[in-house]
Amino acid sequence: MADDSDPHIRTKGEYPPQLQAIVERIEPGWWPKIEVGKGWWPLLERLDQRLAQIDPAYVARRVRADNGHLRFEVTPGTHGVSLHALKGAVNEAAAEAARTCEQCGREVSTTTLHPRRVESYARNSPVH
């Protein structure tokens, strides 16, 4: 089993329960992998719950971090469900992710030298 400190758990059966539901929704043929740090896990759990309210059969394709941005590709699994509604929920989660440290889950400050890299700060000193 993968170490919980590993931000990119690689094997389908090694995800914590809060992410397993998302892994199970990944469309066959797509890599069943969630590539985000542990700090975003609670955010993904909330996103999964919100998406399931919109479409209980929604399908995920790719879930990853890309230069500090959440990328969550989703498609409706139920005829008649609005892709726009699903993407709206994803966009809200992506905005939250932009304010959340991917590693520890704390509120972030974007550095001026690396505007795409987010780090958490406590009393102006880096946490990690």
Image (spheres, grey):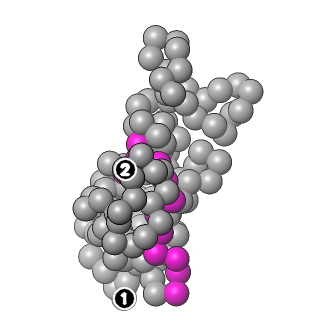
Q: Is residue 62 above or below residue 64?
A: below
Which residue lies most toward the top here? 123
Give the x, y percent position of residue 45: 31, 56
Q: Which of marks 2 and 1 is nearer the N terminus?
A: 2
Q: In this view, does 97 lie above or below 71?
A: above
As measured in the structure, the alpha-carbon distance from the residue carrying label 2 to the one carrying label 1 is 37 Å
Q: In this view, does 110 lie above or below 35?
A: above
Q: What element carries label 1?
A: loop
Residue 7 inside the magenta-drawn segment:
no
Q: Mark 2 sits on what residue?
A: 4
Q: Mark 1 sits on what residue?
A: 79
Q: Is residue 42 visible?
A: yes
Which of discs 2 and 1 lies nearer the camera? The answer is 2
Please name the amino acid that badge 1 sits on.
Answer: His
Give the x, y percent position of residue 10: 47, 66
Please name the amino acid that badge 2 sits on.
Answer: Asp
Q: Is mark 2 on a helix, strand or loop?
A: loop
